[in-house]
Amino acid sequence: MKKLLKYGCAILALVLVYNLGLTALGSGAAEAAGDNPFSDVPDGEWYADDVIWCYDNNIMDGVGGGHFDPNGAMKRAMLVTMLHRVENTPAVTDAPTFPDVPGGQWYSDAVYWAAKNNIVDGDDNGSFRPEDKLTREQAVTILWRYADRPDAGTATGFADEGDIADYARSAVAWAKANNVVDGVGGNRFAPKDGLTRAQAAAILARFLRNRVDEPAQPAEPAGNGTLVVYYSATDNTQRVARIIADTLNADIFELEPVEPYTSADLNWSDSQSRVSREHEDASLRNVELVNAVPDNWDSYDTVFVGYPIWWGGAAWPVNEFITSNDFTGKTVIPFCTSSSSGMGQSGTDLAALAGEGDWQEGRRFQSGASEATVTEWVNSLDLTPSAPAEPEDGTSVVYFTSDISSEGMLAVYEALGWTPTGNVAVKLSTGEPPASNYLRPELIEGVVKAVDGTIVECNTAYGGSRTETAMHMQVAEDHGFTAIADVDILDAEGSMELPVDGEGAATVLSSNLVGSHFGNYDSYVVLSHFKGHAMAGFGGAIKNISIGLGSKEGKCLIHTGGRSHTSPWGGDQTAFTESMAEAGKSVSDYLGEGERIIYISVLNNISIDCDCDGNPAEPDIHDIGILASTDPVAIDQAAYDLCKAADGSEALMQRIDRQMGLHTLEHAEEIGLGSRTYTMVEI
Ligand SMILES: Cc1cc2nc3c(=O)[nH]c(=O)nc-3n(C[C@H](O)[C@H](O)[C@H](O)COP(=O)(O)O)c2cc1C
């Protein structure tokens, strides 16, 4: 399910960390970034880099005298102060107060800011206990809340999971899944242990660096037509909302009061509790929300609105959302949970408050309604799961997930909303032995099986272990491909000629020679591993359908710009890059003008060398994610852009420049293979 990410402070953090890295250091930081100013932080110590990174970015100071005190204990107020600094120490007004956090303390503003942003709250007595030791589970919870409470389930996998407080379970699961935190010995998390200053630096640096490393792409999520908005005080409505969103592949948006309701607040049997007072006095029901306006509101035509029933009506924290948005032209479907009451007038009351919109009857669920009950209702509404909207400007869509797994592959594939017809081929590179970075069978197996595909490849033109069919099949077996699907070497029996005659397409090649079995398949799924290539600059989707589908003779023609049928060597670079685009166009045209071919590219193990190199250089760039598109030009451009924005991309970019890699995309766009302008949609 694609989530409507509330970037808020997380993205702000991203931006600020960039800025902090570029601007002058904080007071007292005399050394250039990267120098170690602390005599008690030995170079090479596991935490040294992280400590210096936090110091360079003005997030942590030393303790004086050139010391950092790595083993010193962190206090609760300290982590909050670090995050406040990351945000550039914003002032806040109307923040919740704590009796033990008077103004004027070194941490006061930070704690007020964190409380106002729901990053911290008080204990049962309403105190913050700023000087208390910060435990590992508290630290992770603070970071998780700061990250906008991403959903990563509650399973942590730690041996002492049972010792983790309930409130911290989701946070620890998220931190573990995202490598923000490691266990201590014996696969334990040690939730109640205190955190040292060195550990805090490591955790925070890891967390913030990951954010910096996230693709700084125009990944502004596009709406998918259906949005599920909900308020939930005790998570019952949240459960239902998530089931609805999952069933419909819809976006989801939680309404969070700036001042969340505690269990004491919700005690309706106490006439003095917050809800009771608000119930008695309607003027107290203006509950301010952290964010009342969902991103991309205009892109939704169907909006579910969920809430708990309070005293027979809709819980009033939804009101600010209703009055802050224009429902004109939207279909609105209310739903609620309650212990026993029905929906009553709650839906019609909200419709009256909204004033606009086509409000449907809606549905009330028992507090603990089963998943089956909810999905059955959703399905009965006959709202087909909506494919993400095409951008209005007509540019191509490239779907992105950072989840490099079989599930991630399937998610981007499904996002395309494409259905293959007839015999399905899955084109990939089987990878040159002994050590190439080809896409592993376990990563692609889900998609291969989902399309019931045959893995197809062509023999190489340059020698190596895959230049003859029998040897090539052996490599396919050794690399695990024959275990997941049938494998067909397309040029085992020679070539098949494809015309290169689209409008303006044939400036270099007059025809393209693919493996002769190419025509045995009706639909193609092109799985590419994006990385550098010694001759083409980079290898992605277009290279995969041009050189990759070429018979030996076809490969020679592409490499030499049509001049040689027998040797791939010695061609002109412009002609070579343009030939790849033209060969790719011939393939796309043959497959129903691109209707019967899709592209998935994986950005992992990104070396400057291709998978046709059995001993590629070590990757310089961290793994980024998986892309999918129906447009081979857009997907290659997006992969290039993501790599370019990543740390360590210099060598790859140099290689691409030197080999005129981008000229392939320029020419491909010129001849109508696709568009270099794209909209990226994060899944
Ligand atoms: C202040 C308050 C008032 C409630 N009033 C009703 C009610 O009138 N009828 C009812 O059946 N349940 C009532 N409930 C129970 C909730 O509607 C029910 O537990 C619901 O599932 C809570 O949803 P949530 O977990 O999403 O907050 C009330 C709960 C609270 C806290």
Image: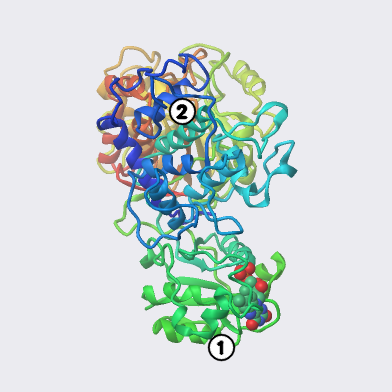
Residue 163 at x, y percent in the picture: 72, 43
In the rendered view of the protein, which quadrant contains the N terminus? bottom right
Q: Earlier in the sequence, mark 2 or mark 1?
A: 1
Residue 423 at x, y percent in the picture: 59, 44
Give the SS element for disc 1: loop
Determine whether 637 is above or below 280 in the image. Answer: above
Any part of residue 599 in sight: no
* Residue at x 38% of width, y 19% of height: 66
Q: Marks 2 and 1, Cα distance to the nearest angstrom?
A: 54 Å
* Residue at x 45% of width, y 26% of height: 50
Q: Is residue 64 left or right of residue 393?
A: right
Residue 166 at x, y percent in the picture: 67, 51
Q: Dot 1: within a 10 Å radius of its alpha carbon, few (fewer than 14), some, or many (20 or more) residues?
A: few
For the residue pair 233 and 645, the one nearer the viewer reads as: 233
* Residue at x 66% of width, y 20% of height: 478
Q: In the drawing, what numbered circle is on residue 345?
A: 1
Check disc 2 and report the residue beneath it.
622
